[in-house]
Amino acid sequence: MAAVQPGQRLVSSADGRTTAWYQRDPQQFRALTQRSITLHAQLLRKWPRLSAQYREAAEHLTSPDAWWPTFEASVDDPPAGR
């Protein structure tokens, strides 16, 4: 096995049964950081509109009637009365 170089790490799992090898990639780090900054700036610009949309839809989004199809789809035998 090759020696671990600077910018690389071998990390054991909590139970000690497996090991993962991590290697730094400065170029990927910069690209992902720039993407994160861009997306956060976009969210900040759109926040007033998104916030208003959510506020208008909150009552419907959180109502039992809106959630019922989700719960109904997750059980084979839905409770009686619906």
Image (cartoon, helix red, strand yellow):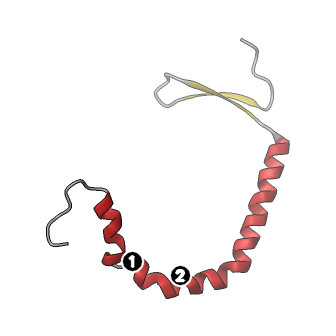
Residue 36 image-quadrant placement: bottom right
Mark closest to the chain's N terminus, 1 or 2: 2
Q: Position of residue 34 (x, y in %)?
A: 81, 58
Q: Residue at x 69, y 73 (%)?
A: 43
Camera-side residue of 69 and 52: 69
Camera-side residue of 10 and 35: 35
Residue 61 image-quadrant placement: bottom left
Please determine whether, in this image, residue 7 is positioned above or below residue 67: above
The reply, left or right, for residue 74 in relation to residue 17 is left
Q: Which mark is residue 26?
A: none
Please tell me whether mark 1 sits on a helix, a strand or a loop. Answer: loop
The mark tally for this picture is 2
Q: Position of residue 24 (x, y in %)?
A: 77, 36
Camera-side residue of 13 and 71: 71
For badge 2, the amino acid type reads: Tyr
Please determine whether, in this image, residue 65 is positioned above or below residue 15: below
The residue that label 1 is drawn on is 62
The residue that label 2 is drawn on is 54
Quadrant housing the N terminus: top right
For badge 1, the amino acid type reads: Thr
Q: Residues within 10 Å of mark 2 (few under 14, many from 20)?
A: few
